[in-house]
Amino acid sequence: MQTLTDPSTLEPMLEKLCYRVPLSATERDAVLALPFTLKTSEHNQFVVRERELATHTCLMLAGFSIRSKLTAFGSRQIVAIHMKGELVDLQNSMLKVADHSVQMLTKGEVALIPREAVSQLTLEHPRIGHAMWTDTLVDGSIFREWIMNVGRRDARTRIAHLLCEFALRLKIAGLGENKQYELPMTQEQLADATGLTPVHVNRTLKSLEADGLIARSSPRSINIGDWRKLAEAGDFDSNYLHLPEAEPALA
Amino acid sequence: MQTLTDPSTLEPMLEKLCYRVPLSATERDAVLALPFTLKTSEHNQFVVRERELATHTCLMLAGFSIRSKLTAFGSRQIVAIHMKGELVDLQNSMLKVADHSVQMLTKGEVALIPREAVSQLTLEHPRIGHAMWTDTLVDGSIFREWIMNVGRRDARTRIAHLLCEFALRLKIAGLGENKQYELPMTQEQLADATGLTPVHVNRTLKSLEADGLIARSSPRSINIGDWRKLAEAGDFDSNYLHLPEAEPALA
DNA sequence: CGGGAGGTTGACAATCGTCAATCAGAGTGG
DNA sequence: CCACTCTGATTGACGATTGTCAACCTCCCG
């Protein structure tokens, strides 16, 4: 596996960074000039494991991944879902020792960037550092929303909320424009993301379907019938995603 | 209210920043030279409200505060607790529009630092920016642990975990060395932090007390009888706090 | 002394978890 | 092409952790 610097590859990352903090041409070039290693990751493969030393930051180029933690008892909590353009493991790599695992949800392509290179880049280009910091702050905002989701919402609302967030983020990442998408997770994974059991997730999805808020041609093929109604059922308000302009609805 | 630059006041913030990323003398001086407004905040007073424009970053000098969010239905979720030395509202102010509220838990003293001054400081001193970024990353790690706490742990474990985290953070902030402290929150606030109801928090505290894991001379005066046992009951592992050296226990 | 906030307790209800069986679909090998 | 198998989805019966409601208590403070 060799280190590459093909500037075209890191485009998704640059797009994400410029999304909120505009960067100059020089700065953009500096980002694209980061060294990286391309890697195809298989379904279910671990990118980082809890407690490991993280030496690289992982940029998602294709596919989906999750971040998760384990309790001592062995149950799993998924704390984030990641898709194209997202720097999955900034968190672990900057803090050196991983406090959670990152695992592929589907087969995908990732670029591994050495921790030191990212660190160096932000020191040489403070505005890039600022952009990455902002990105981390948005991640934090999403974490807070998830705390509220599992802490203060009932099963139906949690699931609806997750479906809304996923739909909107897919759209922003340029992975779908409409109200129909393929959920890349099993119901067990949905359960681990919402703090429920797989059985109850199933019941809840059925209930949402029965009420016409979603339709499913296959178990994971989500079709949002009425965005407004689903957003209401999910207590979903895109404010916490900190999108630049008003991009509140899919409808 | 006038803007001040008394360098002695921002010491707690500097300590926090240098805790993980060592700063040079020049950098330290730059931090201390930040302009700020001193403010005494009363019990229950709001520092920032959800959806407001945040123009300042708030540094806790004395007292405790919480960050919270509201569901549409009106229930509250506390997503973080803050104490001396912590930059409470970096999150809101850097993202401009607040996605959650910050409220004083006790009477306290805060320093309000203009958002622009912080932003400017990090651009002029990239290493300070790096330190603040790291701080934000640690905040993120704590958020993730909280997601797991409310998502995958039962009532007893959640409460025990919160009691452990609070004890350890008090110690790190230099606010207490021993296993005895005064919890600055009501049981209703404990409930909002753990995703439970006040009644069940009460039952759970009683149960922890009955089992000798804690003792309480008054309802909020927590005395940790056996740190190891409480940490075990709370599935508490300080890894996620990313403390510099081994500082795992209080015992 | 009165009022109020917060803490405590008990009875009962309900959301959600557990257990377990069955079903559906994809991939594999004969 | 057809068992065979495995993973994931679905469903039902039952149980339990936790929520709800409501009363009462305790302490602090004006």
Image (spheres, coloured by chain):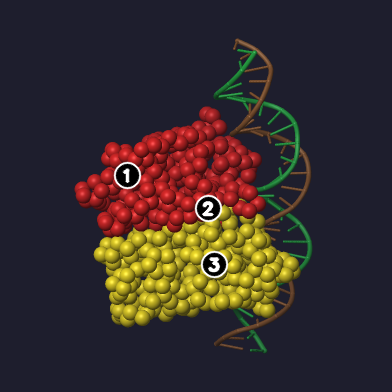
Chain colours: A red, B yellow, C green, D brown
Query: Label 2: few (<14), some or many (≥20) within 10 Å?
Result: some
Query: Label 1: few (<14), some or many (≥20) within 10 Å?
Result: some
The residue positioned 28% from the left and 47% from the top of the image is A31
Q: In the image, is residue B6 above or below residue B137?
A: below
Q: In the image, is residue B107 above or below residue A26?
A: below
x%, y% of residue A57? Answer: 40, 48
Left or right: where D17 falls relative to B194: right
Give, as a three-letter code, the residue at label 2. Answer: Arg
Left or right: where A130 falls relative to A220: left
x%, y% of residue B153? Answer: 63, 55
* Residue found at the very far left of the displayed protein: A25
Judging by the rendered image, the residue that carries numbered circle 2 is A51
Query: Mark 3 belongs to which subunit?
Result: B
Q: CA distance from mark 3 to mark 1?
A: 36 Å
Left or right: where B204 falls relative to A98: right
Task: Assign a secondary structure to mark 1.
Answer: loop
Give, as a three-letter code, the residue at label 3. Answer: Glu
Mark 1 vs 2, N-terminal side: 1
Left or right: where A107 falls relative to A209: left
The residue positioned 66% from the left and 78% from the top of the image is B218
Query: Mark 2 belongs to which subunit?
Result: A
Query: Label 3: few (<14), some or many (≥20) within 10 Å?
Result: few
Q: Quadrant of the image for the C terminus of chain A? A: top left
Give, as a three-letter code, the residue at label 1. Answer: Pro
x%, y% of residue B142? Answer: 50, 60
Q: Are marks 2 and 3 on the same chain?
A: no
Q: CA distance from mark 1 to mark 2?
A: 25 Å
